[in-house]
Image (cartoon, rainbow, N blue to C red):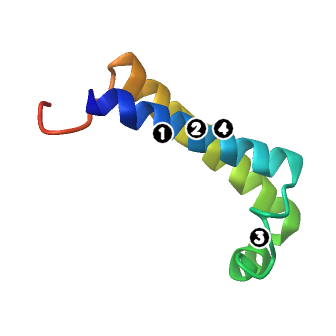
Amino acid sequence: MESTIAGIIFVFFGVLGFAAGLLNWQAVLEPSRNYSFIRALGPLGMRVFYVILGIFVWGVGVAFLSGVLRFGANR
């Protein structure tokens, strides 16, 4: 049960991060919150980072939902 809940949460935030990077959502990529990242990577690099991070988090969520990874005490 814990793996299913964790999988759904990971998939949700993975899709959210992917969409934020792809669609350039200013609420997520706001310069005042991520100033050090934007300064280091640049605006385009920051968007690419969010897309890659979103894909990774989504993949972890799919692994939880498919049973490849388990979450909780019953490993």
> In the rendered structure, are the residues bearing label 2 and label 4 in contact, judged by CB atoms less than 8 Å apart?
yes
Question: Up-down: is 26 above or below 6?
Answer: below
Q: Using the rendered view, name the quadrant where residue 49 is placed.
A: bottom right
Q: Residue 61 vs residue 48: left or right?
A: left
Mark 1 to mark 3: distance in Å?
A: 27 Å
**Residue at (87, 60) in percent of width and height:** 44
User: How far across and down, in percent of the image, does residue 54 sit?
Assistant: 64, 44
| Distance (Cα) linking label 1 and label 2 | 5 Å
Marks 1,2: beta carbons within 8 A: yes
Dot 2 or dot 3: first in sequence order is 2
Q: Is residue 14 visible?
A: yes
- How far apart are labels 3 and 4 at the CA level? 22 Å
Front position among marks 3 and 4: 4
Measuring from the top left, give residue 1's x and y in whole percent.
26, 26
Does label 4 or label 1 sit earlier along the sequence?
A: 1
| The disc label shown at residue 12, or none | 2
Secondary structure under badge 3?
helix
> In what element is the residue under mark 4?
helix
Residue type indicated by callout 3: Leu
In the rendered structure, find residue 9 and report the number of the disc placed on it.
1
- Name which residue lies at 74% across and 62% down: 28
Q: Amino acid at mark 1?
A: Ile
Q: Which mark is residue 34?
A: none
Residue type pointed to by label 2: Phe
Secondary structure of the residue carrying numbered label 2: helix
Residue of label 4: 15
Picture quadrant of residue 19: top right
Which residue, given by chain and number where applicable, does mark 3 sit on? 41
Give the amino acid at mark 4.
Answer: Val
Q: Residue at x 27, y 33 (%)?
A: 2
Q: Earlier in the sequence, mark 1 or mark 3?
A: 1
